[in-house]
Amino acid sequence: MTIKIRTRIQLIVIKQAPFVDIVRVHIDRGRQRASLVSTGNAVERTDSRSTWAQFLSWLECVCVVTFDLELGQAIELVYPHDAKLTEKEKTSICYLSFPDSYSGCLGDTQFSFRFRQSIGRISPDFGEDAYDRDAPVTLQRDLGHFYGYVYFRQVKDVSVKRGYFQKSLVLVSRLPYVHLFHTLLQIIAPEYFEKLEPCLEAVCNEIDQWPSPVPGLTLNLPVMGTVLQVRIPSKTDKPGGSPHLLPAPTLLPTIHELDLFKCFQSALIHLQVLWELTLLGEPLVVMAPSPTMSSEIVLALVSSIAPLKYCSDYRPYFTIHDSEFREYTTRTQAPPNVILGVTNPFFIKTFQSWPHIVRLGDPRMAGDLPKQVKVKKLAKLKTLDTKPGIYTAYKTFLQKDKVLIKRLLKGIQRKRPSEVQSAILRRHLLELTQSFIIPLERYMASLMPLQRSVTPWKVGRDMAFLLIFMLMILSCTYPSSPTTHICYMLSAIHECLSDVKSWMAQHFLQLNYKKTEILVIGPQQISERILPSTGDLSILIKPVARSLEVLFDSNLCFEQHITKIVQSCFFQHRNISKIR
């Protein structure tokens, strides 16, 4: 008898002192691994990146970006140290993690960005069959882009040559968990700016102990003495429902939703314009005074069409240093279908040819209510001193919902909490999207068999007939196939039908010969050889047979099926064109 004993002891000691000592000991008899990490004398992990499996299920890496007098923005630290980022991706992170203008960003600033991964990069295996299968489409991992969540600090510091301390802590992930990661930054960033790398290393080790995100589960995520309790949304969740969370020190009611009312408070009366432009995937530029505002509004626009996924590209924060700058600003072709959030006034001149531009200023109050922007013509968009507004020639199909606007404005006067206002707004946008989806869903459902009509015996009968005859034709496609073999195959079909009829009779069912179809698939010369020998089965032979709502023909060219689909599409398009 052989007994295998596997022992693992893990000890983490963190001392809160000016020189933070972190001792991490692993004793693993299965791997015989040991590592020691201390202040100023860091030793890299001796094992491969597979040891960071739990960390990678949440984050790709953590970056620290600082300002160098000679190089400009530069990455100071990447953790884990073996994170595989290309030079192009590092450059994108450097430029996107600092605001375009530092003058108005004194103190701490948080915002988000999104950038494209390098061409030829091999995406890691996250087990998408497990997560993406159960997660809503809007929360599935983005294998073509990275999300960056930034905590930028700029304070006066006489010890620095430029007179300011400027540094960003960036969380890079493939998950669009905006609220969760910004909350996480609010906890770890202030501590990091005081205690630097040892603190960041301890946080990454804690994240590596988190359970993997599983849709539908409520997770407790400890970090720096705080426990974040979150629920990972599932595609089976009821739209607009609220998660049931247990008491915990810190509760996050959502991991991805933004404060929609705060984002749209200056454009409430034109909400349907923004919703329609987003739904249609129109090119749209959001010009805001800060990266915080631009990223929040772009992400709010993308989430406004939930539960639909915005499939075009979008950049919550876009700069002139972005690798796609030339691609998006060329005037030799039509603007791409993308939503861009910018802060640099230079873009006012660059994007003059774009059909839809949203220009926002600092939120202002007109009495007790936020001042609303107006819809203006593109000709009024000036390079200098452009006033806030929605510059577009687009005419909406929907009229303003005066009841909703009145309800929200009254909530402002009564000082209703912003969370309640956002819930009202999110519910309204959900109903708008559902009213758009339902007719299309009914049409698509008409093309698919109903669940109650797809019974095991019916599917088995249809598929059995289809497979049997395909096997028979495969045996008869050779010119040298003898006639006796064809007769043998036909007798096998007779026996099969007889067995099916007997089985159905035993289960109080009856085989409906009027709905039984036989399709001969093969060249015409093969069909001519088979038809004389079919006997009483000849009345069941059809040129086209239906199976699981698909029309099969004898040549397998699906001409009848394609014709039917095209007719249905034209019919639905004509109906849609009549809606105004």
Image (tube, rainbow, N blue to C red):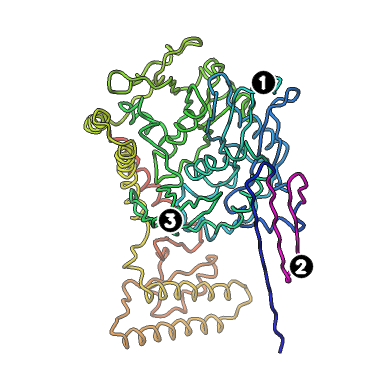
In the displayed structure, 93 sits above or below 511; it is above
N-term-proximal mark, 1 vs 2: 2
State the mark number for residue 32.
Answer: 2
Would you say residue 39 sits in the magenta stretch? yes
Across and down, in percent, residue 456 comes to 38, 75
Percent across and percent down for residue 44 are 76, 51
* Cβ atoms under marks 2 and 3 closer than 8 Å: no
- In three-dimensional space, the C-alpha distance between marks 3 and 1, rounded to whole angstroms, equals 50 Å
Residue 33 visible within the image: yes
Residue 347 falls left or right of residue 309? right
Query: Camera-side residue: 345 or 204?
Result: 204
Q: Secondary structure at mark 3?
A: loop
Q: Which residue is at a point 36% across and 86% down the rendered structure image?
A: 503
Q: Which residues are magenta?
A: 20-43
Residue topped by disc 1: 158
Left or right of residue 560, residue 119 in this image: right
Q: Nearer the viewer, residue 376 or 503?
A: 376
Which numbered dot is residue 234? 3
| Between marks 1 and 2 in the image, the one whose residue lies nearer the viewer | 1
Place residue 569 in its image quadrant: top left
Q: Amino acid at mark 1?
A: Val
Quadrant of the frame with the N terminus: bottom right
Q: What kind of secondary structure does the magenta stretch mostly adopt?
A: loop
